[in-house]
Amino acid sequence: MKCVSGIEVLPLMAVAHRVYRWWMLREARRTWQERGDFRKYAISQGWLTDWQRQHFGWDYYGIRYLVRKATGAFNEI
């Protein structure tokens, strides 16, 4: 196995990937929560029309993209 300065590279890369994946999923969860909270507030204030309330697909697909990017599941449908 390849070593750099006496440290094996493969386990180090695996740990780095797990940290990256955890961070991206955390950010996706936070983004989804923040958008949901803002949507509830906007609805309570009457800022959104009926059409806008029913079409949350852009938020959903944006968050789904972040999760798929973090998990590396772009080839799966």
Image: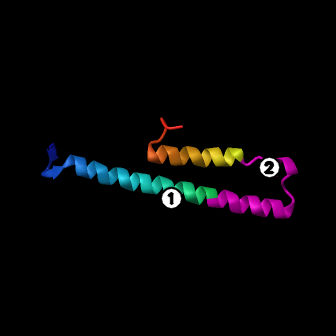
Toward the front, the furthest residue is 77
Q: Position of residue 70 (x, y in %)?
A: 46, 47
Toward the top, the furthest residue is 75
Q: Earlier in the sequence, mark 1 or mark 2?
A: 1
**Amino acid at the residue labelled 1:** Arg
Q: Secondary structure at mark 2?
A: helix
Q: Crowding near pointer 2: few (<14 within 10 Å), some, many (20+)?
A: few
In-image side of 38 versus 23 (left or right): right
Query: At x 50% / y 55%, what residue is drawn?
Result: 25
Which range of residues does the magenta coloring cover?
Answer: 33-56
**Amino acid at the residue labelled 2:** Gln
User: Pointer 2: what residue?
Assistant: 54
In-image side of 5 versus 77 (left or right): left
Q: Classify the position of the N terminus by image quarter.
A: top left
Residue 41 lies in magenta, yes or no?
yes
Closer-to-camera residue (2/57) = 57
- The tag on residue 26 is 1
Q: Is residue 70 above or below residue 27?
A: above
Q: Is residue 14 above or below residue 43?
A: above
